[in-house]
């Protein structure tokens, strides 16, 4: 069974039909740049462009970088604050010609995919899935059950939001070496470990494709640390999965 998934990020909006049985993309994804400013109307237009690229006419799951309750946006990270208070399912459904839309937090979607089809499959205890990109997204699972909307990238670390210190964007903006960035990521993971004592960290986002360059450099963290199996497609897969769970 195929369902469409869209992942809204701070720098790109990407989507594809997803084979729910395999937990993988059914076709190569299509990506457009996130508009600046990333207003509701402009982002909705980009989502419609991505979905229209495939001529899709069924249910659509969409991730959003912020807290989502029901389908209403409560916070907006790395997109325009005009999103706050918007019923995203209604807005996007209208732009998609009445297609049914399910909306959830972006990292929660990636976590659902990784726990079902990826690196967290079958794992019990506390598992934290992290997505490193423009910001840092988080999904916390306890014995396989999601604690939604944790948004742990906004914890304070070194006097600032953790994602400003340790996201992939911070690495790129400051031209950090892998060693320098891994040191920042280690400090962030150690902070999460102090708070949650997880058994497993799953590190996702686009940078997970280069896990061999930085994960071996992260020392003195008790929890097991592994790269996401679905890498930067996890959000798309999880978005599609969410359409059948609600």
Image (cartoon, helix red, strand yellow):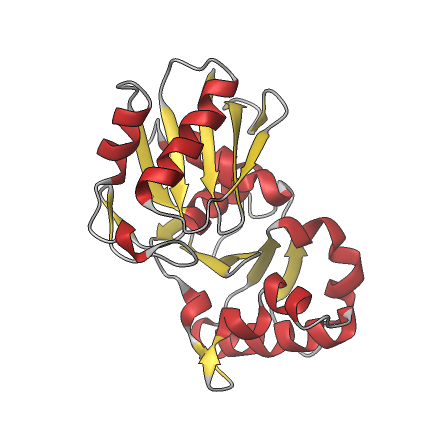
Q: Nearer the viewer, residue 177 or 148?
A: 177
Q: Nearer the viewer, residue 214 or 65?
A: 65
Q: Which residue is drawn at the image coordinates 46% and 33% (left, top)?
A: 6
- Image coordinates for residue 215, horizontal then vertical, percent: 73, 64
Q: Is residue 112 visible?
A: yes
Q: Nearer the viewer, residue 154 or 241?
A: 154
Q: Is residue 118 visible?
A: no
Q: Nearer the viewer, residue 119 or 206?
A: 206
Q: Which residue is drawn at the image coordinates 54% and 49% (left, top)?
A: 11
- 143 over 170 or under it: above or below: above
Q: Which residue is drawn at the image coordinates 25% and 34% (left, top)?
A: 91
**Tally of numbered tags:** 0
Q: Which residue is drawn at the image coordinates 59% and 20% (left, top)?
A: 26
Left or right of residue 95, residue 192 in this image: right
- Image coordinates for residue 69, horizontal then vertical, percent: 23, 48
Left or right of residue 62, residue 18 in this image: right
Quadrant of the drawing holding the C terminus: top left
- Image coordinates for residue 243, horizontal then vertical, percent: 35, 28
- Image coordinates for residue 5, horizontal then vertical, percent: 46, 30
- Most distant residue in the bottom direction: 159
**Snapshot quadrant of residue 178:** bottom right
- 81 over 59 or under it: above or below: below
């Amino acid at each position: 069974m195929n369902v469409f998934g869209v992942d809204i990020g701070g720098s790109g909006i990407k989507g594809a039909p997803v084979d729910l049985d395999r937990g993988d993309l059914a076709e190569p994804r299509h990506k457009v740049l996130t508009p600046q400013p990333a207003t509701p109307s402009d982002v909705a237009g980009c989502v419609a462009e991505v979905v229209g690229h495939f001529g899709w006419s069924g249910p659509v799951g969409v991730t959003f970088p912020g807290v989502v309750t029901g389908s209403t946006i409560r916070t907006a990270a790395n997109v325009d604050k005009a999103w706050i208070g918007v019923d995203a399912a209604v807005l996007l459904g209208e732009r998609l010609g009445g297609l049914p839309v399910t909306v959830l937090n972006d990292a929660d979607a990636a976590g659902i995919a990784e726990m079902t089809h990826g690196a967290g499959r079958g794992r019990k205890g506390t598992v934290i899935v992290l997505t490193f990109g423009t910001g840092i997204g988080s999904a916390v699972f306890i014995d396989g059950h999601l604690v939604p909307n944790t948004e742990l990238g906004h914890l304070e670390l070194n006097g600032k939001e953790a994602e400003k210190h340790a996201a992939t964007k911070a690495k790129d903006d400051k031209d950090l070496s892998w060693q320098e960035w891994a040191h920042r990521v280690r400090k962030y993971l150690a902070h999460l470990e102090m708070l949650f004592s997880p058994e497993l960290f799953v590190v996702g986002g686009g940078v997970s494709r280069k896990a061999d360059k930085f994960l071996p450099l992260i020392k003195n963290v008790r929890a097991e640390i592994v790269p996401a199996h679905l890498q930067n497609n996890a959000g798309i897969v999880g978005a599609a999965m969410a359409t059948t769970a609600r």
